[in-house]
Amino acid sequence: MATLRTLHSLRRLRGRAGRAADVPLRAASLGAGLLYPEHIPTSPLQKALLAAGSAGMALYNPYRHDMVAVLGETTGCHALKILRDQMRRDPEGAQILQERPRISLSTLDLDKLQSLPEGSLGREYLHFLDANRVSPDTRAPTRFVDDEELAYVIQRYREVHDMLHTLLGMPTNILGEIVVKWFEAVQTGLPMCILGALFGPIRLSAQSLQALVSELIPWAVQSGRRAPCVLNLYFERRWEQPLRALREELGIRDPPVQVGGLA
């Protein structure tokens, strides 16, 4: 797998350079009012300006992941508190909050994932990374959330995003991203996800828009409602679980349309 070799190379480079974002987000004495690595304290007015600017850029170019990240952080405080509370009430979610696992090239055992049986979550996740030529290290570190525990919650959401693609069987083309955003909007209530779900379709072709509205949105919404909070899944301890069994556990059925051929 060419992408697997590339991921190995990137991990070696990162291992030499080091990166603060790999460290679990914890409260610490970082000076200057900083609550966690990469934290940038901002006032309500500054957050409003950042939200407006990032929303415009994200709508103009949905692949500006940095702007999508800023929008999520500056508008998601209420939703993040609800998600945090859901995690606290769930045994698996509470363990995630306690241990603060991270998903990155420095924490993934790529060789182990490659050795897992076909159809397992870990093997299918690695296949997703390879087929779509993506890396888990493309997720931006949290910067504008003024609570270290909520900062971890949104970081965890970002780092399991590709896992949700794997669970839903969605590629990373625009249609696939919109379908995942509908699922995430139902699951998380994050304004960023809702905006992406509502305004993302303006870039779709007529054929893709018809498939989205008539079949994929109802499926994504139903899947999001049936599934328990996906942030309560300790994916790293489920690598060996068959993907089919995990989908059945969550109530996620096969997508009604093959999205790969649509754009």
Image: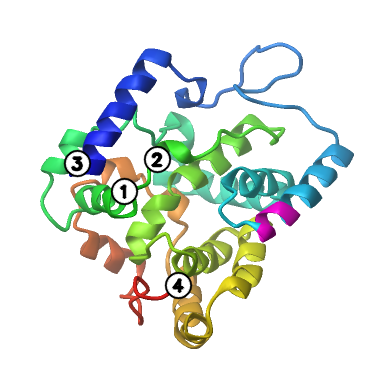
Categorize mark 1 by other alpha carbons within 10 Å: few (<14), some (14-19), many (20+): many
Q: Amino acid at mark 3?
A: Leu
Q: Nearer the viewer, residue 214 or 218?
A: 214
Q: Give the alpha-carbon distance from disc 3 to disc 1, as whole Å.
A: 12 Å
From the image, which quarter does the N terminus lie in?
A: top left
Q: Give the alpha-carbon distance from disc 1 to disc 2, as whole Å.
A: 8 Å
- Place of residue 206 in the rendered image (x, y in percent of width and height, measured from the top left): 53, 85
Q: Nearer the viewer, mark 3 or mark 1?
A: 1
Residue under numbered circle 2: 136
Residue under numbered circle 3: 113
Q: Are marks 1 and 2 in contact (CB under 8 Å)?
A: yes
Q: Amino acid at mark 2?
A: Pro
Q: Nearer the viewer, residue 54 or 22?
A: 54
Q: Amino acid at mark 1?
A: Leu
- Place of residue 233 in the rendered image (x, y in percent of width and height, measured from the top left): 38, 49
Task: Inspect the magenta stretch and tell me whether residue 142 lies in it.
Answer: no
Among the two numbered marks 3 and 2 on one chain, the one whose residue lies closer to the N terminus: 3
Residue 263 badge: 4
